[in-house]
Image: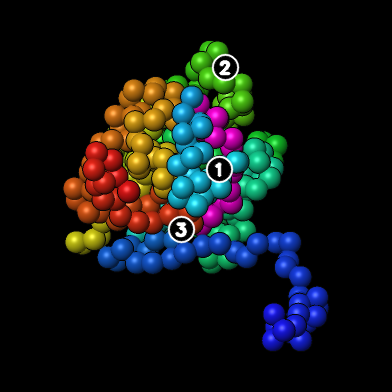
Amino acid sequence: AAALAPTAPGLAHAPQAGKRAQPSFYRFKLGTIEITVVSDGTLAFPAETLWGDRAEDARGLLTSTFQPSSPVGLQINTILVNTGDKLVLIDAGCGVDKFQKTAGGLLGNLAAAGYAPGDIDMILFTHCHFDHLWGISDGKNASLLFPSAEFVASETEVAFWSAPDLPGKVSPKQQPLVTQANLKLASPRLRLIKAGAEVAPGVTTFDTAGHTPGHISVHISSGSEEMLLTGDVVVNSAVSFLHPEWPFGFDLDVPLATKSRMAFLDRAAADKTLVGSYHLPFPGFGHVVREGSAYR
């Protein structure tokens, strides 16, 4: 302590941290395809919202793995895929000040990565939840922010979220009318697909329904290299892997979502494929291995 004392007063004059976070993107090559993770920011929820009756168990697991347990943070990792011919953005974040103020950084971070909204050729939605869809439009959900993009989504997903009786099917907290407003904006440029469709060279969807009726995940391949993108099949690096059987609060069909989660993790572990996740800590990449009857 005595040795440190002379330097201590200097700390009072240290520069203060800026209020704005640094631009957040991460880029690498997958074969000849360039992958850029572009952060839209973060979300935070009580453990009860995310895991219901298992909230107390989840908090214990999070604490044991040195993660904050109240509230629980989720990253928003959009993926920009440059195939050489097309720029494909996979999911579009929340939009600015539409859901939580810690989200909405997509456009600024996209600019930091060297791209403008007009550069995007396609936006592929894994599903139509607020944190994947709402970022396509301005703060009033009145005009589109990506002037040249084709929008691509599962026909099952769009049919569900576009139904006139939707407000009676989902929680009011999900603001279904905002989702419907964004789908209406996108509709002139919206292409509907079935799970399994290749939407761009090397970018193929596959069925992981349950979280929502038409939820899809994505397989990206170039030469001998490949990766899987989760969508919302997993959301936390401890709970989703060590207890994939625990219900997740935003899953609309819990049994089917659990089945899809287990199948995804089985595939990733068996094939030793690189995995990119929408909600895991930025930039969200890793591999899945079996851990007894579960995974990590």
**Which sits in the foreground, 166 or 19?**
19
Residue 283, disc: 3
Front disc: 2 or 1: 1
Q: Is there a contact, CB below 8 Å, between mark 2 and mark 3?
A: no
Within 10 Å of the Cα at label 1, are there few (<14), some (14-19), or many (20+) other Cα atoms? many
Q: Tag 1's secondary structure? A: loop
Magenta-highlighted residues: 37-52
Residue 205 percent location from the top left of the image = 31, 41
Q: In the figure, residue 131 lies in which quadrant?
A: top right
Which quadrant holds the N terminus?
bottom right
Is 167 rendered above or below residue 71?
above
* Residue underneath mark 1: 69
The color scheme shown is rainbow
Q: Tag 2's secondary structure? A: helix
Q: Is residue 42 magenta?
A: yes
Is 194 rendered above or below residue 43?
above
Q: Amino acid at mark 1?
A: Ser
Residue 167, disc: 2
Q: Is residue 253 magenta?
A: no
Please tell me which residue is depicted at 42% across the width and 47% down the height of the picture: 237
Q: Is residue 203 left or right of residue 22?
A: left
Q: Is residue 237 left or right of residue 119?
A: left
**Which sits in the foreground, 210 or 50?**
50
Within 10 Å of the Cα at label 2, are there few (<14), some (14-19), or many (20+) other Cα atoms? some
Q: CA distance from mark 2 to mark 3?
A: 34 Å
Q: CA distance from mark 1 to mark 3?
A: 21 Å
Residue 224, disc: none
Q: Amino acid at mark 2?
A: Pro
**Which sits in the foreground, 109 or 162?**
109
Q: Is there a contact, CB below 8 Å, between mark 2 and mark 1?
A: no
